[in-house]
Image: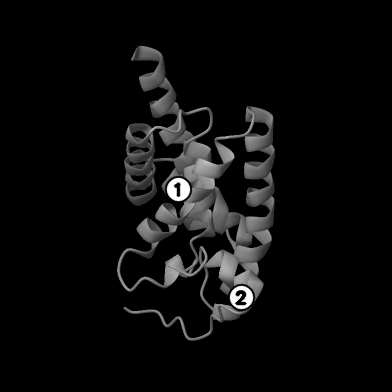
Amino acid sequence: MKVSTASFKLRNPVHFLALGFGSGLAPKAPGTFGTLAGIPIFLVLAQFSLPVYLAVTALFFVVGIAICGVAARDAGVHDHPAIVWDEVVGFLITMIAVPAGWGWVILGFCLFRLFDILKPWPIRLLDRYVGGGFGIMIDDVLAGIFALAVLQLLLYWL
């Protein structure tokens, strides 16, 4: 079933952010394109100290609860596929304290997408039963934490 994106307006700043700067409007795999939109943000934030990175990521999460909730309400669909701000934040969580090299970026991208798509327990549980903007955000936050744990283990071992 194809869900319409007609109710989204990129000139609306809330929609623009919720749609990952428009990346969520990709006709196929909008979550993947939303995650790709997170890469330049990561590359910029990686130049700052860890406390700044964490503060901005936390701010993006809190703001994401509001913007994703508003965008979902405007679309009339909870967790509309075009809403990808949660993927941006999930990717930023994945990349906490990870070097900015392209190998790590690609690995982080793949791990985050893997956990976001497969939704292992308890991610699937949160995705099904938690609503609103928080519900849209929290499953991707947890997918990001899972991917972060794997990346940190790899960093430790390598």
Q: How many marks?
A: 2
Describe the element under mark 1 as helix, strand or loop: helix
Of labels 1 and 2, earlier in sequence is 1
Determine which residue is flagged by label 2.
73
Q: Confirm whether residue 82 shows in the render.
A: yes
Name the image quarter holding the N terminus. bottom left
Describe the element under mark 2 as helix, strand or loop: helix
Residue 131 image point, x, y percent: 58, 61
Label 1 amino acid?
Ile
Quarter of the rendering containing residue 57:
top right
Pointer 2 local density, CA inside 10 Å: few below 14, some 14–19, many at least 20: some
Q: Residue furthest bottom?
A: 6
Q: Identify the residue at horizontal 33%, vertical 74% (top origin).
A: 27
Pointer 1 local density, CA inside 10 Å: few below 14, some 14–19, many at least 20: many
26 w.r.t. 97: above or below = below
Residue 153 image point, x, y percent: 40, 20
Q: Confirm whether residue 139 shows in the render.
A: no
Q: Nearer the viewer, residue 66 or 108?
A: 108
Callout in the foreground (1, 2): 1
Q: Nearer the viewer, residue 82 or 105?
A: 105
109 w.r.t. 86: above or below = above
Residue 124 image point, x, y percent: 42, 49
Give residue 132's mark: none
Q: Identify the residue at horizontal 64%, vertical 35% (top origin).
A: 54
Q: CA distance from mark 1 to mark 2?
A: 27 Å
42 w.r.t. 16: above or below = above
Label 2 amino acid?
Arg
Q: Identify the residue at horizontal 56%, vertical 53% (top origin).
A: 137
Determine which residue is flagged by label 1.
39
